[in-house]
Every structure is written in structure tokens, then in C-alpha cells.
Image (cartoon, helix red, strand yellow):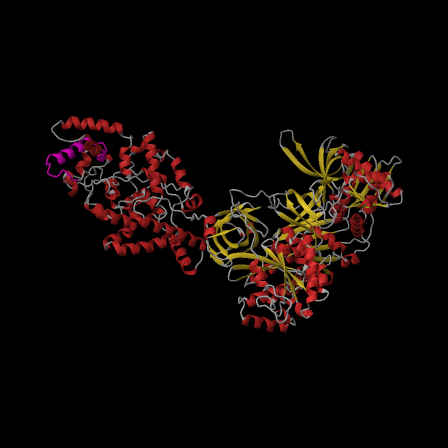
Amino acid sequence: MRLIRKSIERDMSGSVTLYPEEPEDMWHAFNLIRPSDTVRAPAIRRVTTESRTGSTNSQRVHTTLTISVRKIDFDAQGGQLHINGQVTEENKIVSVGMFHTLDLELHRNFTLIKSEWDSVTLGVVKEACNPGDRAEIGAVVLQEGFANICFITEYMTILRQRIEVPVPRKRVGSTTSYEKGLQKFYDVVYQSIIRHFDFSALKVILLASPGFTAEGLKDYLLLTALQTDYKPILHSKKKFVTVHCSTGHIHSLNEVLKSPEVAATLADTKFAKETKAMENFFEMMEKDEFRAWYGPKEVERAVDKGAVGTLLVSNSLFRSNNVAERRKYVRMVEEVKKGGGTSLVLSSIHESGIRLDGLGGIAAILTFPLHDLDESDVEEG
Amino acid sequence: MSRHKNIRNLDLHAGQLRKGLAQVRKTLGTEIPVTDKEIQESLWYYYFDVSKTINYILSQHAPAENPKAKPQPQPSRKAQKGTSGISFSLSSYMAHEHVCASPRTNLPGCLPGIGQGHGSEKKTATELGFFRDCPWGNVPEHRRGEIIVERIHPRGGLLGGSGKMSKLAALAKARKEKAVAEKKQDGEEKASVSLLARLAPKAPARAPTPISKSSLPPTQESKQEIKQKTKQVIMPEPQPEAEPEKIAAASSQGLGHPEDPKTFFPILKDKSIYMPQFTSLLGSPSSFALSFFGERISTIKMNTTNQETFAISGAPTAAQAKAFSEPSPDDIVIAAQSGSKGLNNARKKTDKPVEKIEAAVQAMAIDNAPVKTRKKIDVLEEFKNAKTKESANFVVIGHVDAGKSTLMGRLLYDCGVIDERTIQKFKAEAEKIGKSSFHFAWVLDQTDEERSRGVTMDIATNHFSTASTNFTILDAPGHRDFVPNMIAGASQADFAVLVLDASTGAFESGFQNNGQTREHTLLARAIGISRIIVAVNKLDAVNWNHDRYIEITQQMSHFLSNAGFSSDSTSFVPCSGLTGANIVHDARDKMPWYNGPTLIQTLESSKPQSRGISSPLRITINDVFRGGIQNPVSISGRIEAGSLQVADTLLTLPSKESATVKGIEINEQSSEWAVAGHNVTLHLSGIDIIHLKPGDVMCSPESPIVPLSCFDLKILSLETITPMLVGIHRGRLNASGRVVSLLESIDKTTGKTLKKKPRHVSPGVIARIKVEVTLGAGIPVEKGNKLVLRLGGKTVAAGIVE
């Protein structure tokens, strides 16, 4: 994403013009745009005109529309963002109050007008426009019989395909059906990989599985590529890394990202930091349970007491439609920063973010132990 | 009994009958000694034609020397000859079919003036004149053939089925026909069927459709009678065309006593010519419908009493009715092919019940008991009475490289399941890849990968039997990556054999926090195994040291009692898998300090626990595979509760598809039934393989499991638990789930709530949590099922669904 223009008044209202460059930028836009914001973007609208004789004629017209946002919808698979709202500025084609759904397009500027730009949203803009090295990873998490083909970017984990191929078990006297089933399974995964992955763009392709399935898959991939002379795989032979994990379920990505092979490649990326922070949190929970708290109420009390060293917030909380709630979390983030702590906003469609969402979307590692943060909760309950 | 009699007794034509009776009486006066009943009979035969009735009665009673003459006129000789073998049949629709096929059918339409049928009242002068000089024009009344148009009713198959036999059934029938014909019939009769079959298509389609008597609504009484008849006709239908010969034989015997009411066949034979066959309206159930509804079909049929609507709704021509009643050229070719190559076993399957039914029909005289495809075995009773050996399944668990597979390989070898040659072959091959000590393990580790890596990866199942018990070995992998497979194995077992590596350092490493000795034991206990045999293996590596054995047993018994195994259900056996010491043969020479039982004796003393045989059926699918060309869909798994038998219908969850059990195998031997505790292979039909997955549950359709996507779990935690993503394991089931919330932690001893909504649950605490399945429509679990939660290669908790 590129920042084209930013004009924010002293009362924190103002507009920002952005230029999305890649699908991931839609995710950032999704985190920026809130209901009741105003968005101006190029649009295609179908205009129906009625002639004097009553015949109608409809045309698709390119125009720029300004709408007041009512609903936003993000499609992670396709990387598309649909913004539904009412037109606020009249032009030749539309009048005020008409409804329109904008589909934000890549490589077209859009302007976002907010009545209040808080620090977190500005942080998102800054992050989104950071022209750092993009770490894109293809990952296949598999076990005998099923595989998840996913795509990991800095902010997103996108499940591209889930494959399930029944592999018969070994039986007394005959293992041919097992071996056949396994070959078929590898083949399905291979076909899916070459369909979904752009090998030149990916930094690493992780093959993760319990046991020896990942190695088996790697051998199969390279052998098949050699046999069929499939150049993209042969050229990126070195990118295939096999990693051990405990199951083929997608939640094993946590383990995968923790593993030293991956950590070395991705040391400085945002999600490596996030993964690390989540690990620390769970470790602290086991070591000293009174220094690790989760849940909105508990963390809020800890923030009020100035005890928070690291605050972990999922960005799903900032997407809340309730302005007061959004302000509350922004305040907490700011408080922690003011107190010298670190606050991390985790992407809710990333593995670590999903784990955090399981804990209520917010967690904190405290600098000193606090007891009974949940006391009043029990009384209420 | 006789359908025709029944029809006669119907109230349908009471009015006509009365009127006719009065007329006849009036005309005859009193000089003829004739009873009302006789008159009614005649009226009935002549279809209320008063003049003919009078003629007949006069002819009967005037000469008076032949009082027992048949009341009905004889059919023309030609017709009689042509139809003698087939004009009668038990099943109505058959009757109409065969009678249709007879050459008689075409006559009345062409010769309305001559036939004495229904339409014969209105003969015009022209018609009479036209046929005057024809040879048959002046045939005396008593010699005239009675030519009646047979009503042709639509063969409305229930559920739209054609009611046609399967091709193989047709073939089998043809064969049977031939055999029967050779035995019982002369050449003429033999030829009649095929001859008729050829004649049939030529029958003209112009048969007039007289308005049937049955167009009157039936009275209550008649309805009942129809119901009765309906019951009678249903039974023999599956092999309709096999009937005529038998019946012909029967009728030829019975012909001498046409008036005898007990001689069912001949009366039928004669009267079937007259009767409009409205029972045939019912059609016959298709073979599909038969297998689908079984006996219920009769009930369904009984409800469709309003048959008259069919009777007037249209009569297809003879040619149409016959068009599909025999195999098409294609069918014949297909049948021939399938017969030769063994293709199409679905058809083969249908063949069997048909043969059974044929046999049943032959055995039966007039017994119309419905034929069952499902043998109603009282499985529980059978099980009680069965004098077979006991069967026991045990899982072999332990740390990786403890020697589980080798021990079991040795056991199988010493029991004689594996022959010397195979072991020698394995030995040579193992030496070739530098794993010379692995040859016994190769008995169970069969895949190339397992052999080359020297690690068991999946459960290996094998059987052996001792004098008292049939054992099934479930050899679990020890490697920590394959713990899910071990869970699958343990969930099929009655008890466990824990194998320990006695060599220095190895026992300790298996016993440390991440060792599988520990994890497997806890898992086995959590899954519900309460009996454990500890085999202290590899004692040869420590020189049969007694002290080492004592050290290990002491540590283990302490741990096992902590894990919840009572001391009387744990036993220790020192042994060596590689040398075979104290497994089947005792090894006093090496271990003079041990005089307890050998491993196999200990196994024999382990009796499986009681099983829920009488509860509803539950089978957790362990594997889905193609059981061969005959059985494209087969599953294996353990019957956890209930019982089943061949031809039972099962419901698969969560796919909610039903399947029929085609065959049951227990320990690779086919069986008619199986009960809880058996590890079975089921061959299924009527289901696609995509609806079956390892981990799915098959249950009886009467009491199915409702798949759950969110449920409460009472757990014993083994690691710290917070709301988090987990893998849910149960048998082969391996689903991705999420701990949504922690409800409460519970005191171990008192069972009281320690804390509501704890933030986390520390290891070793009992708690109640809420778990949600993240993918799919839920997993087939129910109250009381034991689940295991794993995360990051560790078992975090074991629990019971609440």
C-alpha cells in the first residue's frame, strides 16, 4: 500500500488517500474502514435510463462515488473487500442516499475520511505502507490422508485448500492398497500445490507433518517434477523445507512457525514476533499464573494498575462496531505504551491471532504478579 | 382360499344375480329340480346371461344321467391344448400374463358373433350372415368354445418398479425350469412356455375391454376379502415364471375332481378363464421394492383397497403388457457376460435370495408364509450358546524401540502362526539393509517405509489362538508422532501389554516426561483399559539381571497405581523378544530367579471385561477399504456395543447414510453375526465409499448417535489447559477442535466444585470444559464416550463426554 495523501486536522478528523498494491492491502483496508466512515473510491455503477416511449436502457458507468459505510465484508480467499453504504455526494449518476456497494480495486486510489483517527488506526496505516520485505510462505500441513494447503503472508494465513483422500490402513498380508492410497494422496497434493503456489514469489515452501509424510511428499514432488519436467518446482528445489509437527490440522501451523527451521528464515517478520509473544504468554501462564491474564475485564484492570508489560490485542477488537468499545481498547494500547510496555496488535486471521481470539482477543503479560483480577467476576457470576 | 370363489362371493353382483335368478326361475317353472345355488352358479358363469343359463340348466337336467357334469362349457380344443400348461397360476398377475399369451385371446375380437362372451348379446344379422358358412358357424351349443377376452391390467409395480426379475435370476429360473420340465413334464408341456413366449407378440391388440364387474364399489366385506387375497398373492411373486410347471403338474392330478372344493388347483384352473383378474391390479413389487420394504409391502398393499379405479383406467394391449416381461437382447448379453466374468456382484447378490425363495416355494404346498431375506437370529442367544473359544484383543504399547513389534513377531512365530521360512526370508532381507535384529518386527511392520526406517507407523493387526482363547494383537507404534494411531489401537483393545526396554538408560528415557511409556500408559487408562501386563523386555541386554528387573517393577508398579491401575490387574513378566525367552517357552536356565507364568500364560489368564452386548449397536470405523472385487466397500472396526447380523441395516454417522451388511468377518472368518467386543470386518452394500471415513460411527438406525459440534467434557488434565485449539481423538477419529471455555474445576476426591470459570486448569486436575469442533458438522460422539485431547504432540487431557 502506498500513502498518497494524508490530511488530518488537529481534532483528529481528516482524510487519508491510499493506493493498494497487493491483495494483502485489502486486509489492511478492512482493518481501517469502519461503519460510519466515509469512503471515496472509483466505482462501476449500472445506470438505467428510461426513454420517453418507456423502453429502458442500462449502461455500466465508471464513476467516483463517495459513500457513508454501513457494512464491510472481506473475502480472504479472493482478497476482495466489499463496502456497502449510502451515497453522500451527488453527481450526474447518483443522488444522495442511494445505496451502492464499492468493490475496492487494486491499483486505484481510495480516500478514507474519518471523524476520528486514533493511534491504532494510524498505526495500521503506517504498518501497511511500510515497504519492508514481504515474507510470503507457502505451507502444506499434512498427515496421511489429509492436507491443508495454505499461504502465509505477514498479516494473513489463508487456507487455500483442504484435501482429504482416504488412505487405507495396512492390513494383514497386503500393503498394496495402503501404498496405492498414499501415492494417490501425494498426487492430489502435488496437483493442488502447482495450482495454488506461485513458486517464484514464495520465499519458502514448508512441508509439515508428523512422521515421515512430509518427507515422502517432498520426494514425490521432486520426482514427479523431474519426470514431468515441471520447471518451476525444479528451479525452487531449495525452497522446500520439511518441518515436523504433531498433526495435519491447520492449528499445527503454530508449531511450524515456532520450529527453528522457520524461525531462522523469518526472524524479523511481524508474525514471528507475534508467535513468540504468544508463546511467552502461555509459558508465563504455566510458570507464574498471576503474571499472565487474559479476557477483556481482567486485562483492563491490570492496565489500570499499570502492571502490563506486554499487551496482546487481536485486531478483531478494533473492528468492533461499537465506538465506545473501540475507544476502550485504543486507550488500553496507548496506556501500555505510555507506561513503557509493548503492545502488539495481532492479526486475527493469523495463527497466533486465532489463538488469541480463543482467549477473548486480549491478553497481557504483567511485569509483577497480580492476584484476584477475576474476583469480582466470580461475584457477578 | 380360491380367489375365484371369493370373487363369486362378493356382493358386487348381488343385484344382477338376484334379478337373473328370478328370471330363470320364472322361465323354468317348477318342473326342473334345480337349486337356487346351481342357478346362481350358472348365471355367474354365463355372466348373467339368462337365456344361456336356462339352456344350460335344461341341458343339464333334462338328460339327468350326467348330474356331475362340469358346469362350465369346455374351451375349444385348440385353446385347451395350447394352454394346458399355463392357463392357471397361483399369482393373479401371472395368470393374466399367461392367459394373455394364449391364442384364445385373439378370437373374440375377430368373431364377435361366435364367441359366447360378454359382448355376444348384440349380434347383428350381418354378422351372423357373414359367418354362416364358416365351419364353426353351426357348432352345437354345448361344444362351443367359450371365448372370453382376458382383461389385461396394467402391471403397476409398486414404487414404479418393473417387477421384472434380475437377469441372473432369470437365468437361474430358466435353468430350474429346464430341470423341472425334464423331470415332470412331457415334451409338449416343455415346449409350451417358449412357444407361448413366441406367440405373445403376435397377439392382436384389439381385445375389447368389457366393463368389469368390479367397477362397482366393493362393500366392506369384499374389501376384507380382497385384503386376504392380496396377502395370498404377494408371497410367491419373486419368481413368478417358475410357477406354471408346478401348477400344471398339480392341476393335472387334480383334474379328476373338479367339484371337490378342497382341490384348489383345478377349480382355479377352470375358473381363471372367466374371472376378470382384478387382483392383478396390485401389480407385483419390484425386486427393489421387495428388498427395500420386505414384509411391509403386504401392509402397504392392503391399504390400497380402491383397486377398481385401475380396472377401468385402461387396458394396455397384450403386446405392450408383454413388451418388457422378458429380458431384452441387451440384458441377455449382459447377463451372459456377468455370468462368465464374475462382474456385477450386485446382481449376483440378488440371485441368492431368489434361489432361496424358489426353494421355499417348492417346499411349500399352499403355505403362504412370507419369505424372509434376513435370518432372524437371536444374536444374544446364539452368543450365549456359542461354544466357540473366547476372543480377546490386546494392544501392545510402550516407548519407541522398546521391542514391541519384535516381541509380538516372536510370539506369533513361537505360536506357529508364522513359519520358519518366512522368518528366514525376513532375516535375510533385514540383514541386507543392515537391520538384522528387526526380522521379527517385520512380521508386523509390513510397509516398505516401516521396514526401511525400522519404526512401526501404524497399528498392525494379527491373530493367534491358544487352547482357550483367540487373540487379536494390535501392535501400536511407539514413536510419538504416531500416538494418534496408538489411540486408535488402544480403543479396540480389551487389555494392554506394556513393553519396557530393560536395557540401561532405555527404560528411564521411556519413562521421562515426554517418554511414550508414560503417555501410552496414561492414554490406555483414559481410554478405558484397566488390565495391563507389563513385559519387561530385552533382559538379555542386561545379562538377565534380577536386580534390574526388580528395580523396574518397583518403579512401574508405583507409577501404575498412581495412573489408576489396581495392583491385582497388573502383572509383570520378564522376557526377551529377540531370544524368545519366557514368551511361549519358559527360560528357567537363564532366569532361575523367576518361576512365574510365561507371557502367553499371562495373556490367557486375562479375561476380557463384560461387554454391552444388549445395548444399541455402535461400531467405530477403523479402516475403510476395498475388500476385493466381490466387496467394493468394506470397513473394519470394533463393535463397542450391541450386536449385528448379516442383512442388518446400519446408519453411518456423521454422513447419515445407511448401508446393508452383506457379510461379517471375525478374524478373517465369515460369520453370521457378531457382538460387542469383536473386531470385525463388514462388507457393506448400498453405500458409496466416500460416505465412510475412519473415525465415523456405524449404529443401528433405531437409536442413532446425534453428531455433536459442541459438547461438555469432564477431563483429567495432563498439561495446562486454557481456551485453545486442540486435536480431538477417539479411535481413528481425529478432529480439530477448540476449548471454548473452562466451566469449573472439580475436587478429585469429593467431586465438589473447586472454582467456577477458572482461567486455566493446571496438570493433574479434574475439570469440566466446553469443547467445540471447528470443522465440519460435528463428530459422532455421545455421552460416556472417552476422548483424548492433544496439542503440539502432547496429550493435554483425557475426558468423558457429558
- Residue at figure coordinates x 82%, y 54% from the top left: A268
Picture layout, residue B115 above or below residue B730: above
Q: Relative to residue B116, is residue A275 drawn left or right?
A: right
- Report whether residue B446 is seen: no
Q: Nearer the viewer, residue B371 or B352?
A: B371
x and y percentages locating residue A294 in the rendered image: 78, 42
Q: Relative to residue B90, is residue A5 drawn left or right?
A: right
x and y percentages locating residue A343 in the rendered image: 84, 45
Q: Is B63 one of the magenta-colored residues?
A: yes
**What quarter of the picture does the C terminus of chain B occupy?**
top right
Q: Nearer the viewer, residue A245 or A7?
A: A245
Picture layout, residue B178 above or below residue B313: below
For residue B769, what is the image quadrant? top right
The residue segment tinted magenta is B44-69
Q: Relative to residue B77, is residue A146 drawn left or right?
A: right
x and y percentages locating residue B616 in the rendered image: 53, 45
Q: Nearer the viewer, residue B566 or A148?
A: B566
Picture layout, residue B553 above or below residue B88: below
For residue B320, what is the image quadrant? top left
For residue B163, what is the image quadrant? top left
**What quarter of the picture does the N terminus of chain B occupy?**
top left
x and y percentages locating residue B641 in the rendered image: 54, 48
